[in-house]
Amino acid sequence: MALRVAIVGAGGAVGSTLLMHMLKSSVLNPGDEIILLGRGTPESNGRLYATRMDLLDAFDEAAVRLTICASIEHLCTDIVVIAAGQTISKNRRTRRDLAHANLPLFERLAERFRKSAGCPLFLVVSNPVELAVAIFAAHLGPEKVIGIGAQQDSLRFARAIASQLGVHRSLVRASVLGEHGEAMVPMWSSVHLTVDDPESTSRLDALKARYERTNIKEEAAMTRKRLEELISTHQLAEAYELMEEIAPSTRIMVEPFITQSQIHSTPNATANATLEILSAAVVADGRRVHGQVQLSGQFHDIHGVCGIPLEVRLNGWLVSSQSQPTSAEIAELRASAGAIDAATKEWQR
Ligand SMILES: NC(=O)c1ccc[n+]([C@@H]2O[C@H](COP(=O)([O-])OP(=O)(O)OC[C@H]3O[C@@H](n4cnc5c(N)ncnc54)[C@H](O)[C@@H]3O)[C@@H](O)[C@H]2O)c1
């Protein structure tokens, strides 16, 4: 049967980049369909029609149907990607600012999807991702809702480690769980190589020994001060070079700060992380991905929204069995889930 994927916010930076990544990937087959949704205004629809034509000109050989849908209520689809909403900007600097801007949109979308046909899998890009997951899970069922932040952070962590080892990311697996924010938990216990190469393995062991016990918050605070100076004097190359001198676990917290100072989004990295989860759901081969989900005790007795390792299918997520966190990491994850719970409750008051 043909696969149907809807993208809400298809005209935005992440939504439109995801369209391109999907059409260039092998995850969709001829006859599959991508449905573009925007705000429903004439301006937004105009942008979607133009985006569609540009994509058809580029990727018509993929033979994937591109359609535009004005009404969520009539949508019948296997996967919905939520990439609509405000993003971090000069006027919205914190996750709290973003929460206040996007809460009404999340509630409206969740309510409208609840009334729509079918029971798709929801992949949530919009931030704060934990707030969106809490709202969507309450309306649409916890097993059907996955936030993509943890996958993006895990890919960043793997790349930061790969960069220090002098190898490509394809050789490194790593998980970042908990919050897609300050309370993220980089899981050193999860870091391993996909090749049996004694030299790289001994370099990874040395890296772990050097950085495993780094106080990320302290190092991040010190690095941010230095970055502010470098960014304010337009020394961007030096700012990115500084990333090689700090722990990979700190790097993933501070590097986005440099990127966001120059471009308003991270469309390619985010589209790639989303596509990885989407592909895992379609292929359904038990591969490990990561996502923020609403838990009721399935992972180390954590309750509430938290980033965890997942196996994903079109009919929902399961906890991945490919993860053995240490007791210290489990304690950190519980603290992260507590911080997420406190923040999401406060934002909804
Ligand atoms: N997980 C991540 O790492 C990550 C990375 C980048 C962006 N994001 C989040 O994804 C979302 C989109 O980011 P972007 O960079 O594509 O932003 P963008 O500003 O380029 O696009 C936002 C899209 O949302 C639509 N939109 C905004 N308000 C809307 C509303 N009230 N109703 C319907 N549609 C609305 C806009 O029309 C636009 O198409 C943001 O919430 C952002 O914070 C997450």
Image (cartoon, rainbow, N blue to C red):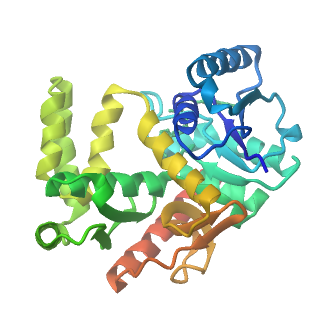
Residue 155, visible in the rendered structure:
yes
Whole-percent x, y for residue 274 in the image: 53, 47
Residue at image x 48%, y 52%? 149
Residue at image x 23%, y 72%? 196
Residue at image x 47%, y 48%? 273
Q: How many marks?
A: 0
| Viewer-closest of 98 and 118 | 118
| Viewer-closest of 266 and 345 | 266
Q: Is residue 80 above or below residue 228?
A: below
Ligand 1, seen in the image, is in the quarter at top right
Q: Is residue 75 left or right of residue 338?
A: right
Whole-percent x, y for residue 148 in the image: 53, 52
Q: Is residue 272 left or right of residue 200?
A: right
Q: Is residue 17 above or below residue 57?
A: below
Residue 130, visible in the rendered structure:
no
Whole-percent x, y for residue 90 in the image: 41, 27
Residue at image x 69%, y 44%? 106
Quadrant of res 317: bottom right
